[in-house]
Image: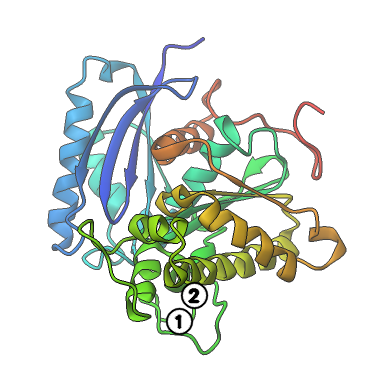
Amino acid sequence: MSDELVAALDIGGTKIAGALVDGTGALAAQTRRPTPARAAGSTVMAAVLAVLDELIASRQWPRVVALGIGSAGPVDASVGTVSPVNIPGWRDFPLIDQARQAVGAMPVTLVGDGVAMAAAEHWQGAARGCANALCMVVSTGVGGGLILGGLPHPGPTGNAGHIGHISVDLDGDPCPCGSRGCVERIASGPNIALRAVAHGWRAGPEGANAASVAAAARAGDRIARASYERAAQALAAGIAATATLVEVELAVIGGGVAGAGEVLFAPLRRALREYARLSFVQELDVVPAQMGTDAGLVGAAAAAARANGLTGFGAAAGSRPGQRVGQ
């Protein structure tokens, strides 16, 4: 096996993580910092560069041959810019150019965080060997990525599969993206908590967040349970629409909200049976992600390795549509 490493960044509204990833998907070194999401764009970039600097200081940095970046989106990989909905200081921000100032001539690859998560789950996780899958991150926001024909499908700008901004409620609340009734506006962790509070749920000392609402739902709280059921309904509508469009056979759900377990997955599977009615989507399965908090890093590394023709990184390729690799 090659001793090459790929550096990876996972940039979201809560944290900026960095790692050096080897050909098995293991993290040879890693670091993270909180995202100053409401600060000026230059301040956010300073935090990204601080994470990069820590990786560059690693004694293993000489083995690094490429940098992969998975960022909250939308991104535009064709020109190297990002405009994350949850980082307002970054609008058409030249992330690739800024990162290149730190890593020099090393190739840099940018994808959306959902695309990175999909690449990771297809390589090492719940979608391993699956030819056609939708992988989703349900957390502070809702993102997604597609596996089509046995390969990650980032699309021309790196945003394909960004299910969080499909509208599932035509007269719903305005979304920060500018649309209305988006999946993210209903199913993200903060919105699950806000809806529960708005309907009379009272948080305990731990505060109002998706995890505390899930705990209350698990304990039988009616309002908390209803908030998760509404989130599950929105997710099911988006998943069914995506499956109908591109015939995925599997939906993988990760992120902090997925940590609610059956509080989320039980109503999600029920709702999916109501929305996925056509014969070719009725067998669609929904499963929890397996890669955890490392998914963005591992997937960003896989995307960079694939873009640069590095062997030994990423999911197996060449499966036929409708076939699992190895069958």
Could you say which quadrant of the image residue 163 lies in?
A: bottom right
Query: Is the residue 202 above or below the residue 102 in the image?
Result: below
Name the residue beneath numbered marker 2: 182
- In percent of the image, x 14 and y 48: which residue is there? 46
Q: Residue furthest bottom?
A: 171
Describe the element under mark 1 as helix, strand or loop: loop
Q: In the visual, does 39 lie left or right of 65?
A: left
Residue corresponding to mark 1: 179
- Asked whether disc 1 touches disc 2, contact meaning CB atoms under 8 Å apart, the reply is yes
Nearer to me, 86 or 90 = 86
Distance from the alpha carbon under mark 1 to that under mark 2 = 7 Å
The amino acid type found where label 1 is placed reads Ser
Residue at (61, 56) in percent of width and height? 266
Residue 90, numbered circle: none
- Residue 107, relative to residue 90: is it above or below? above
Q: Quadrant of residue 296?
A: top left
Which of the pair 269/200 is nearer the observer?
Answer: 200
